[in-house]
Amino acid sequence: MSTSATQTQTQSQSTQHSSKAQRLVDYFKEELERQSGDLYVKGKFIADDVDLSPKEIGALMVQLQDSVEDIEIEKWSYTSATTWRVSDGS
């Protein structure tokens, strides 16, 4: 595979990853606006809402914990699947 093809593939994967991450962030922002207080979510329960697998959600949540400024994501507990606490960044 040529360097150009490898770069294009890497850029495509990066763009795909960022669109999935953005879809998840947008979902959390909308849910936080609809509800008052924090969200407590498990990937398996929101997977259909964001059109991602629970495994993809878990991987993205770890990456988003430190990279999103206007929402706070925290690993909260583990009971049959990880529960995440999501709150607005204030």
Image (cartoon, rainbow, N blue to C red):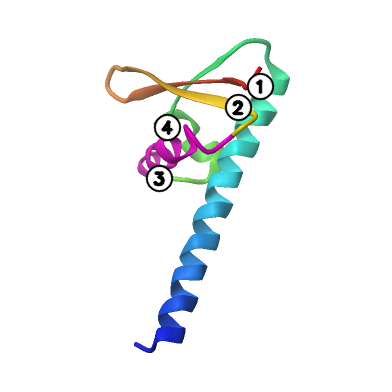
Q: Is residue 1 above or below residue 61?
A: below
User: Looking at the picture, which amino acid does disc 4 mark?
Assistant: Gly
Q: Secondary structure at mark 3?
A: helix
> Mark 3 — residue?
56
Callout 4 crowding tier (Cα within 10 Å): few <14, some 14–19, many ≥20: many
In the image, 51 versus 72, the foreground residue is: 72
Q: Earlier in the sequence, mark 3 or mark 4?
A: 4
Real-space CA distance between mark 2 and mark 1, rounded to the nearest whole angstrom: 9 Å
Q: Residues within 10 Å of mark 2 (few under 14, many from 20)?
A: some
Q: Residue at x 44, y 35 (%)?
A: 61
**Residue 1 sits in quarter:** bottom left
User: Disc 1 marks which amino acid?
Assistant: Leu
Which residue in the protein does label 4 denote?
43
CA separation, marks 1 and 3? Answer: 21 Å
Q: Earlier in the sequence, mark 2 or mark 1?
A: 1
Q: Is label 4 or label 1 in front?
A: 1
Q: Nearer the viewer, mark 3 or mark 2?
A: 2
- On screen, residue 90 versus residue 18, left or right, reads right
x, y (%) of residue 11? 51, 69
**CA neighbours of label 3 inside 10 A, class few (<14), some (14 to 19), many (20+):** some
User: For the point 52% across and 38% down, which residue is it?
Assistant: 67
Membership of 17 in magenta stretch: no
Indicate which disc, 1 or 3, sits on the residue closer to the N terminus: 1
Residue 71: which disc?
Answer: 2
Q: As shown in the figure, which amino acid type bears the numbered disc 3? A: Glu
Q: Earlier in the sequence, mark 2 or mark 4?
A: 4
Distance between the alpha carbons at the discs numbered 4 and 1: 16 Å
Q: Is residue 13 above or below residue 24?
A: below
Earlier along the polypeptide chain: callout 4 or callout 1?
1
Write down the region rendered in magenta.
54-68
Question: Can you identify the residue that label 1 sits on?
Answer: 32
Whole-percent x and y of residue 10? Answer: 44, 70
